[in-house]
């Protein structure tokens, strides 16, 4: 059988997940997830620790191998043994909690290495694209700095510029502000807001409720490995239907309001 490659068209959504299950030993972390993300849609995934939201995101591009179910990215079935995973992944940018930058390279070097090695771009072309994206995230004056010379927020913006330099059709963000000091969060969220406004298809695991409410088209609340409810972001966050969602949002929006025991959080994502 020939290798399968992505087919990006108006008739196939960028992300289609059906019946997704994921277990780690006896611990079933995802229990039958069905989710479709349409072209240009921004979807935020919220939920308590242990709900499975980060595992879901990592399954999307097969950083975690599903136990069962179907994941289609850009028309390619990611669980098919014949799929060209690396080729599909060139269309998918991912930004993690930790910045995962190469410490011995400058910001510019971090944004060019994958272009040259994976996309086989020339040094001049890769640098031109990297410079454009570093400027876009507000780091025109930090291109020659090593990660150690950058703040956490600046490092995360380099990570975003690095992902964008691969010309992705989809961006995945796994708690991109979780490791940042509060005063640095805004700059990273501003870059993500700009991407959303430019029409980038995005899945974002986050605890930033204002970002979810104001920027995303749809918010999904997960708990104990299932999607409890989903809907237009402003509606879900201001007026959730499910009691479990209401308890979670009360705690997030007013951390002194509800004790951890009421949420029953016991498992890591």
Image (cartoon, rainbow, N blue to C red):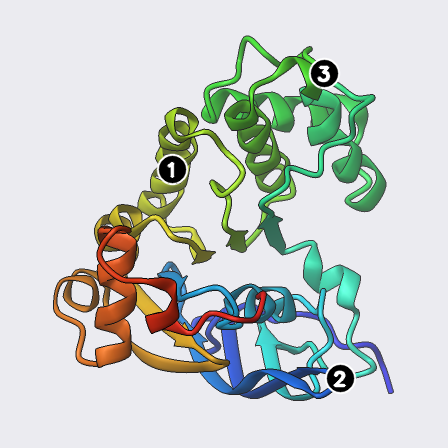
On residue 139, the disc is: none
The residue under the point 46% across, 25% down is 136
For the residue carrying disc 2, how many other residues have a C-alpha within 10 Å: few (<14), some (14-19), or many (20+)? few
Residue of label 1: 189
Neighbours of disc 3 within 10 Å: few (<14), some (14-19), many (20+): some
> What is the CA distance from the residue labelled 3 to the residue labelled 1?
22 Å
Image position, residue 66 (x, y; %): 69, 81
Asked whether residue 146 appears in the rendered view, the answer is: yes
Q: Horizontally, is 75 left or right of 116 in the view? A: left
Q: Between 54 and 244, which is closer to the camera in this rendering?
A: 244
SS type, badge 2: loop
Quarter of the image that includes the C terminus = bottom right
Between 194 and 148, the residue placed more toward the observer is 148
Q: Is residue 18 above or below residue 36?
A: below
Q: In screen coordinates, is 20 left or right of 80? A: left
Q: Position of residue 216 (x, y in %)?
A: 30, 56
Residue, disc 2 = 25
Image-quadrant location for residue 22: bottom right
- Is the Cβ of the residue at disc 3 closer than 8 Å to that at disc 1? no
Query: Between residues 70 and 248, which one lies in front from this camera angle?
Result: 248
């Amino acid at each position: 059988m020939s290798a399968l490659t992505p087919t990006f068209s108006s008739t196939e959504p960028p992300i289609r997940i059906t019946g997704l299950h994921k277990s780690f030993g006896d611990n079933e972390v995802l229990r039958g997830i069905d989710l479709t993300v349409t072209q240009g849609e921004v979807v935020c995934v919220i939920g308590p620790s242990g709900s499975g939201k980060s595992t879901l995101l990592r399954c999307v591009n097969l950083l975690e191998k599903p136990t069962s179910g179907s994941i289609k990215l850009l028309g390619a079935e990611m669980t098919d043994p014949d799929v060209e995973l690396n080729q599909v992944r060139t269309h998918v940018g991912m930004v993690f909690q930790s910045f995962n930058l190469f410490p011995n390279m400058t910001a510019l070097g971090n944004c060019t290495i994958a272009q040259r090695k994976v996309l086989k771009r020339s040094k001049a072309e890769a640098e031109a694209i990297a410079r454009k994206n570093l400027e876009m995230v507000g780091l025109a004056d930090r291109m020659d700095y090593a990660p150690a010379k950058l703040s956490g927020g600046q490092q995360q913006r380099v990570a975003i510029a690095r992902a964008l330099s691969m010309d992705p059709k989809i961006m995945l963000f796994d708690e991109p502000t979780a490791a940042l000091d509060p005063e640095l969060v805004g700059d990273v969220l501003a870059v993500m807001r700009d991407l959303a406004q430019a029409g980038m298809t995005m899945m974002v695991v986050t605890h930033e409720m204002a970002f979810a409410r104001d920027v995303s088209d749809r918010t999904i609340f997960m708990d104990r490995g299932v999607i409890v409810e989903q809907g237009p972001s402003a509606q879900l966050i201001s007026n959730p239907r499910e009691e479990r969602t209401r308890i979670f949002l009360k705690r997030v929006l007013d951390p002194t309001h509800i004790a951890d025991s009421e949420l029953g959080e016991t498992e890591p994502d």
